[in-house]
Amino acid sequence: MTRQSIRVLTLIESSTVTGPSRNLIEFGKLAANPEPGLPPVQVIVATYQRGPGESPLAVTAKNAGLSVFTISERRRWDTKVFPQLRQMIAQCQPDILESRNVKSHFLVRMLGLHRKCRWVAWNHGYTATNWLDRAYSQLDRWSLRGAYRVVTVCGPFADKLESRGIDRDRITVLHNSVKPFVAPPLEQVRRVQHSLGLQDEAVILAVGRLSYEKGIADLLRAAAVLSNTKGVPNFRLVLVGDGPEREALARLASRLGIEGKLTMAGFQRDTKPYYSIATLMAVSSHTEGSPNVVLEAMAAGLPIAATAVGGIPEILEEGLTGLMVPPRNPDAMASAILRILTDPEMRLRLGAAARLRAESNFTPEVYKRSLVEFYQKTLESR
C-alpha cells in the first residue's frame, strides 16, 4: 500500500553546498512530486548557524523550495542547541529523522531524538582534520548502533561500518547521482582555454579539493613520468579546486620539473567548461565513497583513469567505462593515462560508454526512486 506522503527531517552540518548536500537538495525537489507507486516526500533541512546571516546551504535549499530550520550555535559544541533540536522534532513531527554528520549522529542518540520516529543515519566516510573530528569519529561507533537504518555510499564503507558493530542487514548502499551534462556555450569554453593559455595540448583534468587523501601528489608524479616518456603527446595537467595542499603541491611540481605542465585553476563554481576542454579525467584518490567527480566526468562523456578505491569500482567498469589502477602508484596511473592519450579509438569508446552508463544508472530520477522506496520499506518494517 502506497503511503499518502512521507515527511523527512534531515540534520546536516555543512554550511556550504557540497556533494552530499547538493544530492539532498536535488532529491528534495524531485521527491516533492508524486509518481505512480511512489508517495511524495517532503524534505525539511535543518542546518547549524553561527553568527548573522543564513548559510549558503540554507539559502540554496530555500531557493529550491525546501523548508529549512536553522539551529543557532555559538561554537561547535554548544549545549544551547539541545532544546532547539527537541523543539524542532516536536514541531516537525517527522516520519523519518535523518542525520548526515557524526556530530548530528551523536546528538540524535544522546538526546533520544529518535524515540518517536525512525532514525536513518548517513555515512559518507571519515576525514579527520583535527582532534575533534577524530573524537567524533570514535563516538560514531556508539552513535550509529542506535540508528534504525544506516545509509552509506559504497560497499567498502558498508564493510567498515559492519566491522564497527553495525548489523549488516541495517546497512543500505546508495550511490550518488548526476544530472545529464549540458555543454556550455562555445564562447565560454574558449574563454577558459584562453585564460589557461592552452594551445594544442591534451588536457588531463583533475577536479576536487586539494587535500592529502585526494592523492594529487601521486598525480603530479605520474605527470613527471609522462613528461619523461618518449612518444607522449604534448599535455597539460589542469587542477580545478583549492585546499590545504595547494602550496605543497606547487613546490612538488617545481621539484619534479613539471611547472610548465601544470595549471592550478583554483576553485571554480562552474566546472562544465573544464569538462568540455578535457581530453580525459584523472582521479588519484587514496579513498573515496561515491565520488561526484567520477559521475560528472561520465556524464560529460570523458574517458577516466582512476584509482580503484571505495565505490569507484562499483561505478566504473574496467576497460569499458574507464581504466582503474592501484592507489599510491604513480607509474600505474601514468601508464593508464598514456593508453588513453595515445589511443583515440579508446578515448571515444570509453567516453561514450561512460556517458551511457551515467544516463541509465545514476540519474537523479533513478536515485529518487531508490531512496523513496528505501523510505517506504523503512517505515513498513518492524
Image (cartoon, helix red, strand yellow):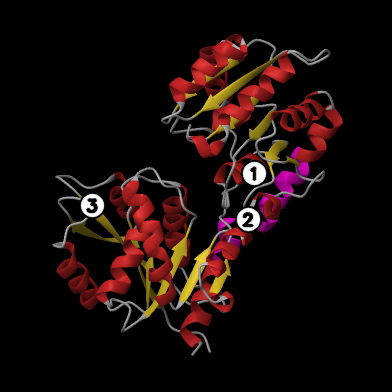
Numbered disc 2: secondary structure: loop
From the image, tell me which residue sits under label 1: 299
The quadrant where residue 207 appears: top right
The picture places residue 137, in percent across and down from the top left corner, at 40, 57
- Binning the other alpha carbons within 10 Å of mark 3 as few (below 14), some (14 to 19) or many (20 upward) gives few
In magenta stretch: residue 353:
yes
Q: Say the numbered circle drawn on residue 337.
A: none
Placement of 19 over or under 333, stated as above or below: below
Numbered disc 3: secondary structure: loop
- Binning the other alpha carbons within 10 Å of mark 1 as few (below 14), some (14 to 19) or many (20 upward) gives many
Residue at (18% x, 45% y) in the render: 53
The picture places residue 99, in percent across and down from the top left corner, at 37, 65
Q: Is residue 70 visible?
A: yes
Residue at (60% x, 9% y) in the render: 260
From the image, tell me which residue sits under label 3: 76
* Magenta span dominant secondary structure: helix
Q: Amino acid at mark 3?
A: Arg
Q: Are marks 2 and 1 in contact (CB under 8 Å)?
A: yes
Q: Is residue 14 visible?
A: no
Numbered disc 1: secondary structure: helix
Q: Amino acid at mark 1?
A: Ala
Q: Which residues are magenta?
A: 351-368
The quadrant where residue 239 appears: top right
Counting residues from the N terminus, which is met first, the one under dot 3 or under dot 2? Answer: 3
Placement of 50 over or under 27, stated as above or below: above
CA distance separating discs 1 and 3: 37 Å
From the image, tell me which residue sits under label 2: 362
Circle 1 or circle 3, nearest the eye: 3
